[in-house]
Amino acid sequence: MPYLDPAEVLRELSRYTVSEIRPAIPEDEAFVRGQAGSMASTLRFLAGELEGMDAAVATQRESLLDALAAAREPVEDPHVSSVLAEAADRVADAEGTPAEIENELLAAADDALTAVDTLEDETARRARAPLYAFLDTRLDAQLGLLGRPATDG
C-alpha cells in the first residue's frame, strides 16, 4: 500500500469539498454551504499544522545532532563521550510520528545532559553550551508552531 502524506490528504479533501461537495449543495441551503466551506478551511489549516510539526521536528533533529557533536569536542572522559555518541546515533536513527521522534530527541538530550553533568566544571560548561543551544532551538520551534515570534536568545 502506498504511503499517503497526511497533509496532502487533508488538502485533497479540502479541494474536493470546495470543488465538488459545496457546489452540489442547493443555494437555499446557505448554512450547509457555509459549513462545507468552513470544513474545507479547517482541513487546509490542519494540513499546514502537520507540515509545521514535521518541519519543527526536522529542525530540532538537525540542531541536536550538531549540539551533540559540538558537546563531544571538549570531552575527554570516555564514558561521557560514549553516551554523547550513543545519543547522536539514537537521534539520527529515530523514526515514527513527529511526536515519537520528538520524544526520542528529548530523551537523548536528557541523557546527554545527565552525562555532561558528571564532568568537571569548565568542561561541563563547554559541553553543556551547545546542548542549551538545542533547547533554545526547540523553544523557538515550539513558539513558531504557536504562531509566536522566536526568542531573542
Image: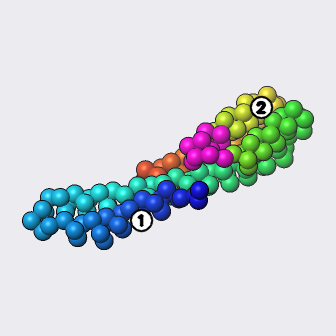
Residue with the mark numbered 1: 12
The residue closer to the viewer here, 10 or 118, is 10
The x, y position of residue 69, in whole percent, is: 79, 49
Q: How many marks?
A: 2
Span colored in magenta: 95-105
Q: Residue furthest left?
A: 28
N-terminal label among 2 and 1 = 1
Give, as a three-letter code, the residue at label 1: Glu
Q: Residue at image x 45%, y 55%?
A: 49
The x, y position of residue 82, in whole percent, is: 85, 37
Q: Nearer the viewer, mark 2 or mark 1?
A: 1
Report, in whole angstroms, how far the alpha carbon at label 2 lies from the one at label 1. Answer: 47 Å
The x, y position of residue 23, in whole percent, is: 23, 70
**Residue 144 visible in the displayed image:** no
**Residue 116 visible in the displayed image:** yes
Q: Residue at image x 19%, y 65%?
A: 25
